[in-house]
Amino acid sequence: MDADKIRKLLVDVQDGKMQADEAFNRLRTLPYEDLGFAHLDLHRSLRTGLPEVVFCQNKTPEQAIAIFQRLAAHHDRVMGTRATPDLARRVLEAIPDAHFDTTSRLITISRTDLPAPAEKPYAMVVSAGTSDISVAEEAAATLEFNGDRVLRAYDVGVAGLHRLLDYLEQLLQRAGETSNVNRER
């Protein structure tokens, strides 16, 4: 449960839209909920600003679905990493507003957007070869999901600097945008 949801819950009680017992029942799972096979950290977004992320690798579809459903009941944004296409298909069948990206292998639920502020600097995700693209895209998409601005440079190689230098103009342009915004403050 994030800070906005807790505030709304308290305001609803204050305004008489919700009984105190109902609010108590919603809060009683803080800071975590025991699903028997997993302990979900529902309090993490209050401590860190980001909710718990589901590491999907080696989870059964039933486990992943249960975890996603419980996290989605408490958060507007939920992410799962390292999902197989089969697991993702099963999660999407159970949770229609979930999305799966085959390259990054991320399952996401986004009921609210986190637009990256224009003054925020860019992070650049770089991969040496095409075999690294899925891991690099997982990192890039995770950054974007959390409201960061991202530049990508994939398959730039390890054999020579020349392939990375193809991105120099893009880097300099983005660095100029950031420094101009910071100068205006």
Image (cartoon, helix red, strand yellow):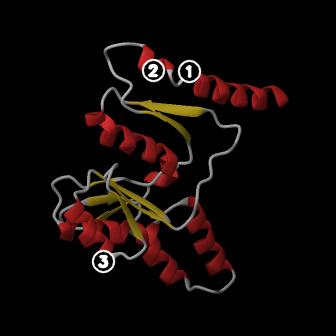
Q: Nearer the viewer, residue 34 or 65?
A: 65
Left or right, 92 with reference to 58: right
Q: Which mark is residue 66?
A: none
Q: Nearer the N terminus, badge 3 or badge 1?
A: 3
- Distance between the alpha carbons at the discs numbered 3 and 1: 44 Å
Q: Disc 3 designates what residue?
A: 94
Q: Quadrant of residue 133?
A: top left
Which residue occupies the foreground of this view, 15 or 174? 174
**173 or 37, which lies in front?**
173
Tell which circle, 2 or 3, labels the residue nearer the N-terminal end: 3
Note whether 134 is above or below 127 in the view shown: below
Q: Position of residue 177 (x, y in %)?
A: 71, 31
SS state under label 3: helix
The amino acid beneath tag 3 is Ala
Q: At which x and y percent is residue 6?
A: 56, 66
Dot 1: element? helix
Q: Is residue 65 visible?
A: no
Q: Can residue 132 be seen here?
A: yes
Seen in the picture, residue 154 relative to 161 is either above or below; the reply is below
Residue under pointer 1: 168
Q: Which residue is mark 2?
A: 164
Q: Nearer the viewer, mark 3 or mark 1?
A: 1
Residue 114 lies, in percent from the top left, at 59, 54
Amino acid type of disc 1? Leu
Residue type (three-letter) at the residue carrying disc 2? Leu
Pointer 1 and pointer 2: residues touching (CB < 8 Å)?
A: yes
| Residue in the picture at 19% in, 67% down | 61
Mark 2 element type = helix
Q: CA distance from mark 1 to mark 2?
A: 7 Å
